[in-house]
Image (cartoon, grey):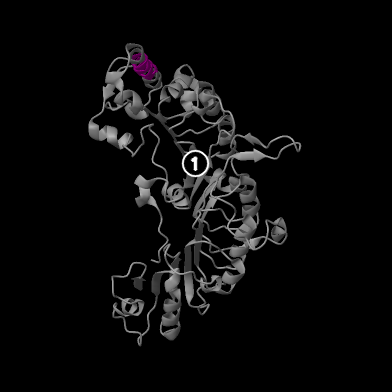
């Protein structure tokens, strides 16, 4: 395969020279030519590929929007008009407009991967998404990064029209990667129920806050807590592991089954819009705690990192969720999970392995300058965490569990586990290496939020997450 990136040519070098500088023999044939270019360079690239169409077997193209001072190009020139059997991958990046009818001649059964990113990061209407997919029956990967409040829908050529779904399910037997930006839950459900994607291995989507239409002309739309997309229940029911993390006002749920699939769903402000009690923001949305046991019935490993359930939520969740697996809890309120288990042998039986890490960097960072009253609260916090931990050590030890069946960590201290050779409730401290193996350090912000996923960063504007620009997906031909 020959890779050529002409988006940033050295001064004085022409596109033609860049293409020929790789010294490949056009007479003997090139199995795959991968080209990344800018919109105003496309005509030259197109002419070069067309001139050698008999020897270039397959082509991957990434077209990036022009620089601000570049001349305007007619809309009809943004689409690479290539021999249909030749183009296998196409990425259209940072273009102002997206015209489906103009793009249609390029789509077809030959196209394997399609990535589209609007300059505004505006979302794509679900009916347009469906039309894209319907023209690519052998598509293997589809990606469209977009974010919440990024402007109007990207120029759908038809208005949102659910009639496009009034036909037999669209069969996409080769689709393994489906990464979508911000899409309303009901729209996503409609789309996903209309396509057959049995081979899908990687799915990512961002869901905006739940809203309901106004009940009268004078009222305003209401907002509700997050709900899981029920179109994904077949996969959720098969999932063996789940990880729930939070970053600022976003909660991310990752789940999957080893060697088969991984899903990643981001919920923007899942508590709903409008006035929300401060205490409510310190715990997971109630609806999520209710849905988890119903949707995920075969979980063998669960991890919560960041915003956590409170004591009541933990008690209800663990009583109805037959995890019978390892549970890892990381966050400022990790004590509440331990409290919910403290006097509940029936719940302890459900959790063979429990790892809990109370981490509060703000408290640790500002401790020296804190008022005495605040320091006292921090001291009481540590005392409660360790006291409840000792109770669980004793309970698990009485059940004959292994030493590492309960492992806890407070702030940056070494982790502790059951001292099976000591008195009931006593702890043995782990080495730094052993602590790191159980509680690996992660990049976190000042509020202890876990680092957002690369897909979430990719979907936002370049002005967001400037310090995490290395996580952004570039979509250049590869």
User: To which residue does mark 1 refer?
Assistant: 253
Q: In this picture, is 289 found above or below 181?
A: above
Residue 384 locus on image (x, y percent) = 38, 15
| Residue at the extreme bottom of the image, as rendered | 27
Q: Is residue 312 above or below residue 470?
A: above
Q: Nearer the viewer, residue 389 or 21?
A: 21
x, y percentage for residue 250? 49, 39
Residue 397, position as x, y percentages in the image: 37, 21
Residue 209 included in the magenta stretch of the image: no
Give the secondary structure at mark 1. Answer: strand
Q: Is residue 177 visible?
A: no
> Which quadrant, please, contains the C terminus?
bottom left
The prevailing secondary structure element of the residues shown in magenta is helix
Query: Which of 434 and 363 lies nearest the eye of the viewer?
Result: 363
Q: Is residue 60 above or below residue 458?
A: below
Percent x, y of residue 79: 52, 72
Tell me what residue is drawn at x 50 percent, y 34 percent.
Answer: 323
Q: Is residue 304 left or right of residue 216?
A: left
User: Residue at left 49%, top 38%?
Assistant: 251
Pointer 1 local density, CA inside 10 Å: few below 14, some 14–19, many at least 20:
some
Which span is picked out in magenta? 377-391
Give the answer, above or below, for where 191 lies relative to 75.
Answer: above
Return the residue nearer the eye: 26 or 168.
26
Magenta-span inclusion, residue 382: yes
- The answer to which quarter of the image holds residue 132 is bottom right
Quadrant (top left/top right/bottom left/bottom right) for the N terminus: bottom left
Residue 314 seen in render: yes
């Amino acid at each position: 395969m020959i890779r050529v990136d002409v988006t940033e040519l050295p001064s004085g070098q022409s596109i033609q020279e860049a293409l020929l500088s790789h010294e490949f023999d056009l007479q003997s044939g090139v199995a795959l030519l991968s080209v990344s270019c800018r919109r105003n360079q496309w005509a030259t690239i197109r002419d070069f590929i067309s001139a050698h169409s008999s020897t270039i077997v397959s082509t991957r193209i990434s077209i990036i929007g022009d620089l601000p001072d570049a001349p305007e190009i007619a809309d009809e020139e943004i689409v690479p008009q290539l021999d249909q059997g030749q183009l296998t991958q196409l990425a259209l990046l940072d273009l102002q407009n997206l015209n489906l009818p103009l793009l249609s001649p390029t789509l077809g059964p030959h196209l394997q991967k399609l990535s589209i990113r609007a300059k505004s990061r505006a979302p794509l209407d679900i009916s347009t998404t469906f039309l894209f997919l319907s023209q690519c029956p052998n598509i293997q990967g589809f990606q469209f990064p977009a974010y919440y409040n990024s402007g109007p829908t990207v120029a759908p050529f038809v208005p949102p029209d659910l009639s496009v779904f009034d036909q037999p399910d669209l069969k996409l037997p080769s689709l393994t990667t489906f990464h979508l930006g911000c899409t309303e839950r009901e729209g996503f459900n409609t789309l996903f129920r209309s396509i057959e994607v049995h081979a899908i291995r990687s799915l990512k989507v961002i869901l905006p806050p739940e809203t309901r239409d106004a009940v009268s002309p004078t009222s305003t739309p209401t907002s509700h807590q997050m709900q899981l997309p029920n179109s994904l229940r077949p996969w959720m029911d098969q999932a063996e592991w789940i990880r729930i993390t939070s970053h600022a006002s976003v909660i991310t749920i990752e789940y999957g089954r080893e060697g088969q699939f991984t899903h990643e769903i981001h919920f923007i402000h899942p508590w709903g819009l409008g006035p929300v009690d401060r205490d409510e923001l310190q715990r997971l949305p109630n609806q999520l705690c209710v849905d988890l046991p119903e949707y995920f019935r075969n979980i063998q490993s669960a991890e919560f990192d960041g915003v956590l359930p409170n004591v009541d939520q933990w008690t209800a969740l663990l009583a109805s969720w037959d995890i019978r697996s390892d549970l890892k809890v990381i966050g400022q309120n990790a004590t509440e999970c331990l409290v919910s288990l403290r006097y509940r042998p029936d719940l302890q039986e459900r959790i063979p392995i429990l790892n809990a890490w109370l981490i509060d960097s703000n408290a640790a960072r500002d401790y020296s300058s804190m008022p005495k009253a605040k320091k006292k609260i921090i001291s009481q916090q540590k005392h409660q965490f360790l006291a409840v931990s000792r109770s669980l050590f004793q309970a698990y030890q009485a059940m004959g569990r292994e030493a590492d069946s309960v492992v806890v960590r407070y702030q940056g201290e070494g982790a502790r586990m059951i001292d099976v050779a000591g008195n009931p409730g006593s702890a043995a401290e782990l080495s730094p290496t052993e602590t790191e193996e159980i509680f690996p350090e992660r990049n976190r912000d000042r509020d202890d939020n876990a680092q957002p996923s690369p897909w979430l960063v990719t979907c936002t504007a370049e002005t967001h997450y400037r310090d995490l620009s290395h996580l952004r997906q570039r979509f250049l031909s590869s």
